[in-house]
Image: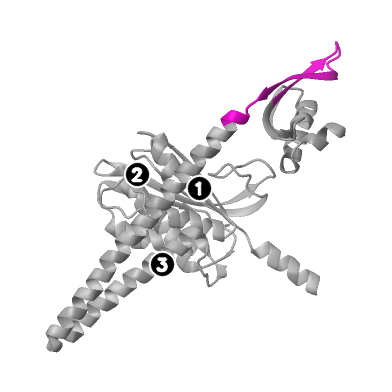
Amino acid sequence: MGWLDAVHDEDQQVALNNWQNILTSGKSTAAEYRVRSRDGDWRWLKVRGVPIKDSQGTITEIAGTVVDITERKQLELQLHQSQRLESLGVLAGGIAHDFNNILTAIMGHCSLAEMKSEQAGKHLREIQIAVARASELCRQMLAYAGKAQFVQSQVNIRSLVDEVIRALSPTVKQNVEITAQLSDDIPLIKADTSQISQITKNLIINAVEAIGELQGKIRVSLTKAEIKAGHEKDYLGKIIPSGWYACLEVADNGCGMSDDVYNRIFEPFYSTKFTGRGLGMSAVLGIVTSSSGALQLSSKPDEGTTVKVYLPEQVRLKVEEMQVEG
């Protein structure tokens, strides 16, 4: 297979799959991959193959077209780098702003405690509150980065989600109705209970904010889902590994998202609300990633939003390990 030697190592599987898809489906397919040119440079090509069939419908040859898209790919890379730098700027600015407010509060109460020693206890309590806010900010950023330290255990996620819904429902505005559809056959998962609670809480709060002052509904469902190989992609377009998952779905009929909001919703400190901190959804994605899970997001303006979180089943793996050890 000499032609494959000219294809970049990272793209060889893509190139192979493209031609195999033509043979198995009998339909025209296209793929983009890098090929080394005669001068030694790597060029991005868009290769489209078209099957040629005989009178019996058997594929006898494959015709196709090749378009050099190197310039377009370079522009996409420059745009991606620009967006990444912008996101880092927003991240740094958000952290600096929040920590500056916290430090200002601490310094203020320290000064007041020195001036009026008889009220030192009151100011110490305020300092403790400020330190707790700083600690929570650090935890949220670690969750966003996927670096949070979890205390993992076997978790009954159905009970956990039900508990969060019961706790939040009384605090939600009367114009919002929350309904729960929690299946009984949900597998146990290996996770940190506080982090799973945070996912559920943040998704519901985000849905409440999307509804605003209008009458609206939020549906929280929990099901056992099987992902088959190559059948589902996550929010980032990556294939979700096959297997059994506990699937948490939060759907609302709120304002929905524009393309710009959809593309930025998981950026830290990005928020469509004037008073929003913009850490909830970024923390959700970080926690899901750290839990070897996956997230799907669908939304359209004025049609609502649906978020699906897939958390992998752990029980089956444990049983198999016990059988092997025995």
Q: Which one is closest to the eye, mark 1 or mark 2?
A: 1
Q: Position of residue 264 (x, y in %)?
A: 42, 44
Amino acid under label 1? Lys
> In the drawing, what numbered circle is on residue 65?
none
- Could you tell me which secondary element the residue under label 1 belongs to? strand
Choose the circle earlier in sequence order: 1 or 3.
3
Q: Quadrant of the C terminus?
A: bottom right
> In the drawing, what numbered circle is on residue 138?
3
Q: Position of residue 193 (x, y in %)?
A: 49, 68
Per the model, the C-alpha gap separating discs 2 and 3 is 33 Å
Within 10 Å of disc 1 (Cα), the crowding (few <14, some 14-19, many 20+) is: many
The kind of secondary structure the magenta stretch mainly shows is strand
Q: Identify which residue is drawn at 52% across, 56% down.
A: 288
Residue 248 visible, this angle: yes
The residue singled out by tag 2 in the image is: 217
Q: Which residues are magenta?
A: 47-72
121 in the magenta segment? no
The residue singled out by tag 1 in the image is: 308
